[in-house]
Image (tube, grey):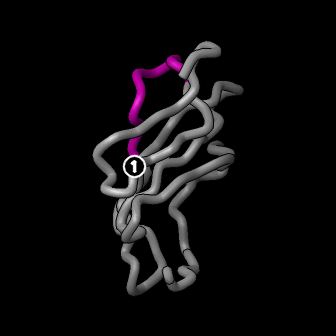
Amino acid sequence: GVEPRVLTSLPLTPDLAFDTFDCNEDFSEMVMEVRVDETATLFRMKLETAAGAAASAPEPLLPQGQGGMHPALSPDGRRLAYVSGGAL
């Protein structure tokens, strides 16, 4: 089985509201739905699995103003599915 992992620190600023998320199989990467100015969008962040903390600052995955919700990351981290404009 997979061992539980605890994230101890995420570098989010107060103006970003973190919502849903998904991680790849080895928990080295996380994709999250973040609200920016009332618009849901997607950010990616590298994780330091041994320390349970972020290894990089969150970076946007979509162009500014393009919405994205309910991210689902493939186990190997190569593919991402998400909802945008009512479509998958």
The location of residue 60, given as percent across then percent down, is 41, 37
Residue 50: within the magenta? no
Q: Is residue 19 above or below residue 66?
A: below
The secondary structure type at the circle numbered 1 is loop
User: Split into 4 quadrants, where in the image is the C terminus?
Assistant: top right
**In the visual, does 7 lie left or right of 43?**
right
Q: How many numbered circles does the render carry? A: 1
Q: Quadrant of residue 70?
A: top right
Q: Is residue 2 above or below residue 14?
A: below
Magenta residues, start to end? 59-67
> Observer-nearest residue: 39 or 85?
85
The location of residue 42, given as percent across then percent down, is 50, 37
Which SS type dominates the magenta stretch?
loop
The location of residue 76, given as percent across then percent down, is 31, 56
Judging by the rendered image, the residue that carries numbered circle 1 is 74
Identify the residue shown where x is 43% and y is 51%. 58
Q: Quadrant of residue 24?
A: bottom left
The furthest residue to the front = 1
Identify the residue shown where x is 46% and y is 34%. 81
Q: Is residue 6 above or below residue 25?
A: below
Q: Is residue 39 above or below residue 26?
A: above
> Observer-nearest residue: 14 or 34?
34
Residue 61: within the magenta? yes
Identify the residue shown where x is 52% and y is 17%. 65
